[in-house]
Amino acid sequence: MSNKNRYIKWFEELDKDSIPKVGGKAANLGEMINAGFPIPPGFAITIDAFEEFLESARRFGKKAKIVEIISKIDPKNTQELEDTSAFVREIIEATPVPEEIVEEIRRAYQELCRKIGIEDVAVAVRSSATAEDVPDASFAGQQDTYLWISRFEGVMKHVVKCWSSLYSPRAIAYRATKGFSHWDVSIGVAVQKMVNSRSSGVMFTLNPTHGDESQIVIEASWGLGEAIVSGSVTPDRFVVDKVTMEIVERTVSTKLYWTVYDPDKGSVIHGEVPEELREEPSLTDQEIIRLAEIGKKIEKHYGTPQDIEWAIDDDLPFPENVFITQSRPETVWSKKKKEPVIGKKSGYDLIMNRALTRYKVPKS
């Protein structure tokens, strides 16, 4: 069925060269799933779907209106930016989606439900811009992601919201100040099975504090990773030696707040962590080492230090519960010039020669 689809690509059909088709995030998910990394299953809605959606908007005179009003924005005028973004997004979200696009997305979501064996399976609906998660751009995080979306009607609604997020205030301002045309960047959408996150966080395959590439740093907290991103919680922090794979530093923080899915309310909520969990580490040592092993392999696969998002599924046993949800190049220390220190090899080269030696992951 997939080879007949114009607007849908399963992750297994994608790789790092698929960015022009589906955007950076979806392309990287496909690259990693085909490399054998534990990625939750899903599919991408292609750039063509968005572009044809805009063509349908043009027939209503809307595309020309969007171009006209965005071209007049002063990106330094915050209020104008907010108002214009809200207006443009309202225009897009009120535009009917062509029926052939709706039907392909419907069939793909139904197929995902069948593959997983769950009716109306909950998914993350994630924006995937063409300039996102690539080494030479900083578009990551400027478009929207929606979590715990179930039923086709909810998926379709949030796909359109992802499309309209190409015109979020932050995205408009970034393109304007950096000299990008608003039409040089397009957007795909990744629809991916939701991980029932007991714990989640980020992992750097170097130490982001001082750039030491012989270390992996994992930041973790209870629930969804939004609590870490928003700054509402100080995460646990674990440092793993990339060569010996030993935990060399651990800091367990007091975690007062979390972001979790509330099945009774049918939505994601922000609340207080139960008292018995506040002082407890949000990862076991087994999970820390498992994450570090995967992170080391992802870095080797891409050939550069990575900034990785991960989640631990509360419904599955170890090690099947460890999932990677995103990986992008680390953009701070990786770009610093690496000066030769011994012969023609830099300190970076010497560390990486040690750190990336072949090893075996013990089978559980």
Image (cartoon, rainbow, N blue to C red):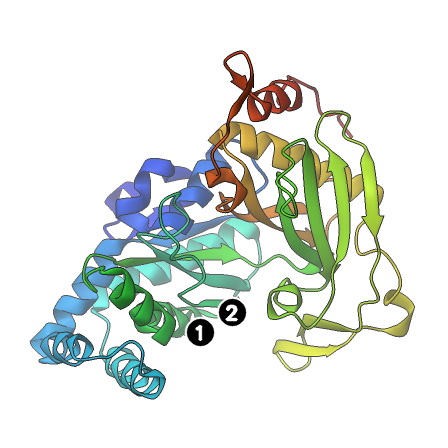
The quadrant where residue 254 appears: bottom right
Direction from residue 213 to residue 257 in the image, left or right? right
Residue 67: image location, x then y, percent: 14, 74
Identity, as a three-letter code, of the amino acid under mark 1: Gly
Question: Quick one: 274 or 72, which is closer to the camera?
Answer: 72
From this view, report whether residue 260 is shown above or below residue 34: below
Residue 87: image location, x then y, percent: 27, 86
* Residue at point 88%, 60% (across, down): 280
Question: Quick one: 244 or 44, which is closer to the camera?
Answer: 244
- Secondary structure beneath dot 2 equals loop
Q: Residues within 10 Å of mark 1 (few under 14, many from 20)?
A: some
Question: Quick one: 174 or 8, which is closer to the camera?
Answer: 174
Direction from residue 171 to residue 328 in the image, left or right? right
Outermost residue to the right: 276
Q: Quadrant of the C terminus?
A: top right
How far apart are the alpha carbons under marks 2 and 1? 6 Å
Q: Residues within 10 Å of mark 2 (few under 14, many from 20)?
A: many
Question: Quick one: 165 or 245, which is closer to the camera?
Answer: 245
Identity, as a three-letter code, of the amino acid under mark 2: Ser
Residue at which label 1 appears: 154
Asked if residue 316 can be seen in this view, the reply is yes
Residue at which label 2 appears: 150
The answer to whether the residue labelled 2 contacts the one labelled 1, judged by CB atoms less than 8 Å apart, is: yes
Q: Quadrant of the N terminus?
A: top left
